[in-house]
Amino acid sequence: YEEELVYDIFSVHRAALSDATYTLFFEAGDAYEKYLQDEKEKSWYDTGIAADGDDQILVLVTCTADQKDERIVILGRKR
C-alpha cells in the first residue's frame, strides 16, 4: 500500500468492555454525531481536534496493566 494515511487524535480514554465506544454501526440521524461528541468529552486530553459525521475514524484499543475489564482507547480522524 503506497498511500500514507495520517490520523489526528481527538480522544484518549479508558473504556469498559461494555462501553458504547465499541459501537460499529449507527442508525441514520444524529446518533453518530452524538457518539463522536461523547468520545471527545471522555478524553483525558484536549487535543484541539474535533471529529464530525463526515470524518473517517480510526479506533485503536489496547489492554491496561491494572484492569481486566477495561481498555485504553485512542480515536483519530483521517486527515
Image (tube, rainbow, N blue to C red):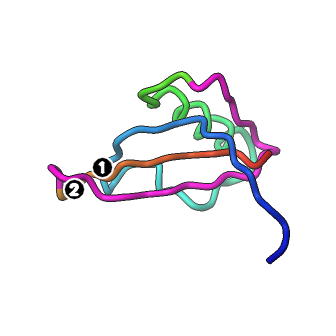
Describe the element under mark 1 as helix, strand or loop.
Answer: strand
| Magenta stretch contains residue 54 | yes
Question: Residue 3 or 49: which is nearer the viewer?
Answer: 3
Which residue sits at x=74%, y=51%?
6
Residue 28 image point, x, y percent: 74, 51
Residue 33 image point, x, y percent: 68, 37
Q: Quadrant of the N terminus?
A: bottom right
Q: Is residue 54 above or below residue 51?
A: below
Residue 30 image point, x, y percent: 71, 38
Which residue sits at x=54%, y=22%?
46
| Magenta stretch contains residue 59 | yes
Q: Quadrant of the C terminus?
A: top right
Tell me, yes or no, whether the two marked residues, 2 and 1, touch with CB atoms within 8 Å.
Answer: yes
Residue 38 image point, x, y percent: 53, 32
Which residue was labeled with disc 1?
16
Q: Is residue 7 above or below residue 25?
A: above
Residue range in magenta is: 47-67
Kind of residue at badge 1: Ala
Residue 79: mark? none
The image quadrant of residue 63 is bottom left
Which residue sits at x=69%, y=48%?
7
Which residue was labeled with disc 2?
69
Q: Earlier in the sequence, mark 2 or mark 1?
A: 1
Q: Is residue 6 left or right of residue 23?
A: right
Kind of residue at badge 2: Asp
Question: Residue 29 or 51: which is nearer the viewer?
Answer: 51
